[in-house]
Image (cartoon, helix red, strand yellow):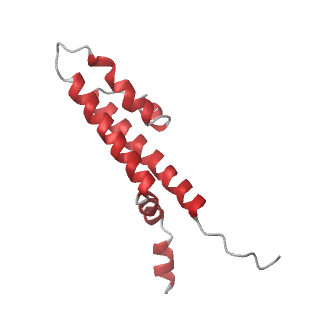
Amino acid sequence: MTGTDAHAARSPLHRLGRNLRNPFALSYLVLCAGLLLWAIAITIPADSDGAMAVVVPLMATAPASLVLLALPGGATVVIVAVALGALVNASIIGWCARALTRGNGPDATR
């Protein structure tokens, strides 16, 4: 493996992709997408009482979504905040799952 190949294998985008391919992270992303679609479908009708439905996907993707929600804007900021919050949290979930399921070989120093 050349120096550029080793560097490319350790790039942040490669690590992010590896974390997001974890089944737990993918499940979380699907859940967040479903919650966001549900909140949009409930909120769109004008006579609906579902105006607070957007809180559910925001809480599911907290704390990253709440930080991004402070930006000025309307509905697009909420959608972007939920999407980026879900990606951040899914990456953390994938990283934790990889760390916990990593095989521990015998320690050579013992």
Residue drawn 37% across the image and 47% down it: 29
109, above or below 44, in the image: below
How many numbered callouts?
0
Percent across and percent down for residue 72 are 36, 27
Residue drawn 38% across the image and 25% down it: 55
Judge from the rendering whether residue 37 lies leftward or rightward of residue 90; answer left or right.
left
Residue drawn 51% across the image and 79% down it: 6
Instruction: Place residue 32 in its image quadrant.
Output: top left
Instruction: Place residue 82 in its image quadrant.
Output: top left
109, above or below 92, in the image: below
Percent across and percent down for residue 89 are 47, 45
Q: Quadrant of the C terminus?
A: bottom right
Q: Which of 74 and 102 is in front in this view?
A: 102
Determine the residue located farthest toward the right in the rendered image: 110
29, above or below 99, in the image: above
Judge from the rendering whether residue 80 lies leftward or rightward of residue 107; answer left or right.
left
| Residue 71 appears in the figure | no
| Residue 77 appears in the figure | yes
Instruction: Place residue 56 in its image quadrant.
Output: top left
Residue drawn 67% across the image and 74% down it: 105
Determine the residue located farthest toward the bottom in the rendered image: 1
Percent across and percent down for residue 62 are 47, 34
Q: Which of 85 and 90 is in front in this view?
A: 90
Percent across and percent down for residue 59 are 44, 30
